[in-house]
Image (cartoon, rainbow, N blue to C red):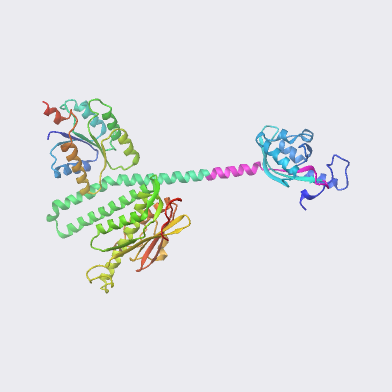
Amino acid sequence: MPLHSMSLPLPPSNAPKAGDDRFRLAMTASNIGMAIVSTDGIWLEVNPALCAMLGYRVDELRGRHYSEVTHPDDLAISQHLVAALVSGALASVDEHKRYVHRDGSDVWVQLNVAVMRDEDGTAQYFISHMRDIRGEREAGMALSARAEERSAELDASHRQLQLFADAVAHDLRAPLRSIESFSALLHERAAERLNETDRDYLARIRAAASRMTGLLAALTELSHVTRTQMRIAPVDLSLLADWVGAELQDADPHHRAQISVQPGLQVEGDERLLKLMLNQLMHNAWKFTCERSAARHAAGQASAPSAPSADEPEPVRIEVFGERSGDRLVLSVRDQGTGFDMRYAHKLFEPFQRLHGPDQGGGHGLGLAIAWRIAERHRGQLRAHSQPDLGSTFTVELPVVSAGEDTPNA
Amino acid sequence: MHKEILLVEDNPDDVELTRLAFDEAKIANRLVVMGDGAEALDYLLREGTHADRAEGNPAVILLDLKLPKVNGLEVLKAVRGTAGLKSIPVVMLTSSQTESDVVQSYELGVNAYVVKPVEFKQFVTAIADLGVFWAVLNEPPPGSLRAARRYE
């Protein structure tokens, strides 16, 4: 039976009645602070636990107004709550509150107040419970301080790692330039004087240097993409995709591009980064489609109906489309290339992970990590779905331009 | 064609590649090389071991950022802060793409900031283009060796 609906007798300062003794015993023995408070706010009865909590003797607290030991910052709200209890606006109070210890320190308590009413419903007095929560608060604050510390440590170590990676990449450039340049010069000056094996060895040096160069460039890009300040503005993804498509065709006139881009793909983000991301995704699509068509050609398979002759490679089909979903645009880049084994999909976006060897068109394994990081900075997650030899689709959710802009065709 | 180009670079490989690049671009200007920032300043101020050098400033200073003793930014600051030197064109040639380095260099008054390419062909093109522009095409501020001779 909830306390506040009981009609209890008047406080024990009147002549004791049957049942009073048990209540008084309970109050005295309880190790939760308790007080019986008049509707004016006078502490009519206080128990030893409450006194110990506040550092006073029973006779020092009994008869005092609660405001005398209430923390000044909590005074106003206490008065408000008391008035609400009396008027019936509130049935009970369950709040954190600060009292002031005799020594001046703060005493945080969990305060529960119930109203005792007579048969007419008039408030007669309050029964208050005060549970000392100082220990809990300290523990809680220590915990959240520790969590903040840990988070700052993680941040710092992250930054340190990035700085280290940057420094290494930076310092590798000069020696790499030496290797790349002097092996190229050697080839220019001495190729005729070298025998076939010598030339082969020299070629391997140059190839390795070239791979390192690509890797270093990608590392620099990954670092840049992670650290650069984003400039958020409305971005026309359709335009960017068309642009990337044109660049892909220009770079590889041998293959015929069939790139379809859905018009009206508008998002909000950093244009340079989004172009970079599209670049990575569409470049991959192109690369693995060419790989597949080359593999089929090499295997002597009959060319697809769309290829006009057996010698001309199949056109490279890439689709870029989008669908609205709430306040985001789900962007997809689909190809009909080599595809990959979905069992390893979770490794796809990790730096340096490659699911295709160099013979299958695999690169340095950073391209998708870069795309993934850009997606993450736009608070979207890059996902991939594939079927080996049928193609892959990469999707990412991006924020849409705020109200007032045209929505893309669904 | 009497303008000097001052290259301040501590990496001997990069010095050799720069020479090669200038040769390939048929840039005939004399290339003066200083291996650290302190010596570069001695040369420019005609102090220390360079006290007897002929008067006149180089047509352009190609300055690396990371140098022993006195680094590139400090050299740039000194050049821009010295009355007789402050108008010499300075091109920062560096491996660093760090935004703060770029910003600082421009704030200190660098004329151009070029990141040294890793690939040889691109390096040669970049150096050659720089040489042709700053040492051949560009009209240097008065006080450069060529200008000094011209008005003699």
Visible residue check, residue A33: no
Q: Residue furthest bottom?
A: A302
How many numbered markers are drawn? 0
Q: Position of residue A269 (x, y in %)?
A: 40, 50
Q: Name the foreground residue: A334 vs A207.
A: A334
Q: Is residue A141 magenta?
A: yes
Q: Is residue B96 magenta?
A: no
Q: Is residue A301 above or below residue A74?
A: below
Q: Is residue B82 above or below residue A333?
A: above
Q: Is residue A321 above or below residue A150?
A: below
User: Going by the image, does A161 lie left or right of A140?
Assistant: left
Q: Name the foreground residue: A218 vs A210.
A: A218
Location of the C terminus of chain A by quadrant is: bottom left
Q: Which residues are magenta?
A: A118-147
Q: Position of residue A398 (x, y in %)?
A: 43, 54
User: Going by the image, does B2 lie left or right of B45?
Assistant: left
Q: Name the foreground residue: A219 vs B102.
A: B102
**Which residue is pictured at 78% across the width and 53% down the height?**
A1
Visible residue check, residue A124: yes
Q: Position of residue B34 (x, y in %)?
A: 21, 34
Q: Name the foreground residue: B113 vs A102.
A: B113
Q: Position of residue B110 (x, y in %)?
A: 27, 35
The quadrant where residue B51 appears: top left
The quadrant where residue A262 appears: bottom left
